Image: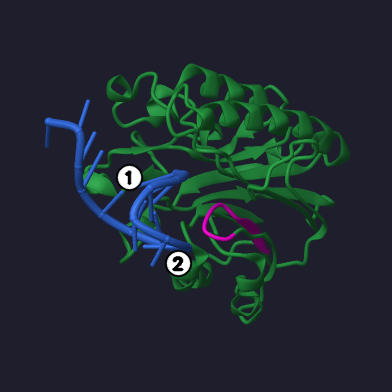
Chain colours: A green, B blue
DNA sequence: ATGGTGGCACCGCCA
């Protein structure tokens, strides 16, 4: 079973690329972030036409998340309970798996703009609310995978130039601590369960030829619960779509679960 | 060198 995440920075613009990618990578679930479209504009038919189901939480202009899946999802929920927020950043759904129900969450964590800004404070509060919610979700759903754009590079090895980025938003210590707090719930960073190439990143700024220089960050992650961790047999970043025409600034990350 | 690019919606905001 394969699970993937991709911040596509406008589903309207990137739909052909998402369909091409799914044709080449027929994963069981693809979590999308930054749809940037309202619910009523979600292109459901494009996905049903190629044999996928979808659940989504859309928003005009900003944010928006979805789970595209081979099997229909059930018990779908949106947003973080108790965290009053018009921004659509979370959707959770339950998919069947050979081991039983599998909770799949697509998350678009706040960017934070700049350390000390209002948006940065919002980001940290948002992570605290995510942490509280996941505590409960993990009890209800022992097989849980939360995939998305975390807007946090967890360690210096996830940063192309750690000295230049030191203390900046996306790498600051409070953000990294918020990420570690999630891991302390028993979640594992699937990518780091395996040996990986040096300088592996999932996002490159559009500016200054960042992709060409591999000046990126690893901020898109797949976190797996304790029950799923031993089933994970691979996790890879697919750099290819970042080199396509009119790309997203992020590229997909894919985890493989093997049920023996 | 305090820039640059991209998407959206309306020319600034967000990333």
Q: Is residue A66 magenta?
A: yes
- Which quarter shows the N terminus of chain A? bottom right
Residue A118 located left or right of residue A163: right
Disc with the residue nearer the chain's start (1 vs 2) = 2
Q: Is residue A260 visible?
A: no
**Region in magenta:** A60-68
Q: Is residue A77 visible?
A: yes
- Tell me the distance, in whole angstroms, between the alpha carbons under discs 1 and 2: 17 Å
Q: Which mark is residue A5?
A: none
- Disc 1 on helix, strand or loop? loop
Residue A100 located left or right of residue A192: right
- Disc 2 on helix, strand or loop? helix
* Residue A21, above or below A149: below
x 52%, y 29%: residue: A118
Residues marked 1 and 2, same chain: yes
Q: Position of residue A3 (x, y in %)?
A: 62, 53
Chain containing the residue with disc 2: A
Q: Position of residue A143 (x, y in %)?
A: 78, 42
In this rendered view, identify the residue nearer to me: A188 or A38.
A38
Question: Which residue is situated farthest in the right direction here?
Answer: A140
Residue A217 located left or right of residue A229: left
Q: Which mark is residue A14?
A: 2
x 61%, y 78%: residue: A50
Q: Position of residue A216 (x, y in %)?
A: 34, 39
x 72%, y 27%: residue: A186
Q: Is residue A83 magenta?
A: no
> Number of marks in the image?
2
Q: Position of residue A85 (x, y in %)?
A: 69, 42
The answer to whether mark 1 and mark 2 are in CB contact below 8 A is no
Q: Which mark is residue A205?
A: 1
Figure quadrant of residue A17: bottom left
Chain containing the residue with disc 1: A
């Amino acid at each position: 079973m394969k699970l993937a995440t991709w911040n596509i920075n406008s589903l309207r613009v990137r739909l052909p690329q998402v369909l091409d990618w799914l044709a080449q990578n027929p994963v069981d679930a693809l979590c999308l972030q930054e749809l940037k479209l309202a619910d009523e504009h979600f292109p459901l038919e494009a996905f049903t036409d190629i044999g996928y189901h979808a659940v989504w939480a859309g928003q005009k202009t900003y944010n928006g998340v979805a789970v595209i899946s081979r099997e229909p999802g059930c018990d779908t929920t949106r947003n973080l309970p108790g965290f009053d927020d018009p921004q659509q950043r979370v959707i959770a759904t339950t998919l069947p798996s050979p081991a039983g129900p599998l909770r799949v969450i697509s998350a678009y964590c706040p960017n934070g703009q700049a350390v000390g800004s209002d948006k940065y404070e919002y980001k940290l509060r948002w992570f605290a609310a995510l942490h509280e919610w996941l505590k409960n979700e993990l009890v209800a759903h022992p097989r849980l995978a939360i995939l998305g754009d975390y807007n946090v590079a967890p360690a210096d090895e996830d940063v192309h130039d750690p000295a230049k980025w030191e203390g900046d938003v996306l790498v600051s210590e409070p953000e990294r601590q918020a990420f570690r707090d999630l891991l302390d719930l028993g979640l594992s960073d699937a990518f780091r369960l395996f040996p990986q190439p040096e300088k592996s990143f999932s996002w490159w700024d559009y500016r200054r030829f960042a992709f060409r220089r591999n000046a990126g960050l690893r901020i898109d992650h797949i976190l797996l619960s304790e029950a799923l961790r031993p089933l994970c047999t691979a996790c890879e970043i697919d750099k290819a779509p970042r080199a396509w025409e009119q790309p997203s600034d992020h590229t997909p990350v894919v985890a493989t679960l093997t049920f023996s």
